[in-house]
Image (cartoon, rainbow, N blue to C red):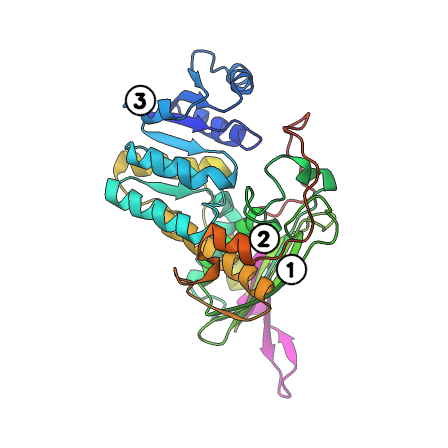
Amino acid sequence: MINVAIVGVGAISPAHIEAYKKFEELCQITTLCDIDLEKAREKSKSYNLRTVPVFKDFDQICEDPDIDLVSICTPPSTHAYIAIRLLKAGKHVLIEKPMASSLEECDEINKVAAEENRIVSVIAQNRFFTPMMKVKQVLDQKLIGKVVHSQVDSYWWRGSCYYDLWWRGTWEKEGGGCTLNHAVHHIDILQWMNGMPQEVTAVMSNTSHDNAEVEDISVAILKYADGTMAQVTSSVIHHGEEQQLIFQGEKARVSVPWKVYASTSTENGFPSKDHSTEQTLEQTYNNLPSLNHEGHGGQIYDVLTAIKENKPVLVDGIQGRQTLELITAIYKSASEKTTVSLPLDASDHFYSKEGIMEHTIYFNEKTYQVEEFGTERITTGGEYSS
């Protein structure tokens, strides 16, 4: 039995708690931890975890030899410190997105994990939806030929008060805006499916959130070593939250949500519908199996089975770093108004958190904050996973 602790019982923690409770044959939640003890006690009661100890200080988790795995659900600026302490205490860690506030912190987490032979997984729950997995397999089978252009529309909408929460909207505590904390899901999918680009050119702005230092929209152009390209729009200003990932191949286009279109050339170069290719792609997609567990549940099941069977996780710390590297390149390009070459290393201004805070763009001054909202309910205006 794998003993699990959860550090941080804010809005995202229910996704972890509910997922762990689905797999009671593999694990049990043995500890909850939060700086707000009363909030943690309420969470314990609401999820029928009344006998589970509740701590304020996560050092008590570090000192408990019976805890095997810890979900870190705290603000991004705390991820590295907590993860490193837990890894050194012999715990496996599952870190909510983003992995950390900087590439420097990611590298330190991965270094300690390797030294301690512990698992680090970074939440990328959108990989664990059936449509994503199916499109990944279609691309891996080269059924649309080489991908020549990808389009990522990471469209979200948040009201101005969203950034009133004490840790949001600042480079120091949140680490960035919509590119880091919302589009991270889609950017992870892009680098998982397409690999890392060679160059990034980006712009960003804050159009609608005057209590935030960070961006509420960014647009990036990615260029790969073979000359192919991708474009990524990250936003919290799009009503309806209509999100999509489109992959244009030499033979056809596919997307999430699933849609396929294939063209063949007429004598003069204009397109004619390629019904045969479309039919092959439709049949392949429809015949691929659905996942047994999706979202956070799918990723948590992956981590639990990796611990039990001593095998790699699908989303490890190296991939968590790659996603953050791509986001960091977007911030660097937009801030310095230049094309950025990858990879980024320790000599770069944007490698460390301090470097980012010194060299990035501050759009507004945060002048108002609240400790918490009256509700933790998370709503979305669109659904892109099915």
Q: Which residue is identified by label 2?
A: 179
Say which amino acid is labelled 1.
Met
Q: Which residue is identified by label 3?
A: 64
**In this rendering, would 57 be left or right of 254?**
left
Disc number lying in front (2 or 1): 1
Q: Residue at x 64, y 88 (%)?
A: 268
Say which amino acid is labelled 3.
Asp
| 326 over 17 or under it: above or below | below
Lower position in the chain sequence, tag 2 or tag 3:
3
The one nearer the camera, 258 or 59, is 59
Callout 1 secondary element: strand
| Residue 287 can be seen, yes or no | no
Instruction: From the top left corner, tell me how far across and down residue 103 is, in percent.
Output: 43, 53
Say which amino acid is labelled 2.
Thr
Q: Are marks 2 and 1 in contact (CB under 8 Å)?
A: yes
Q: Which residue is identified by label 1?
A: 204
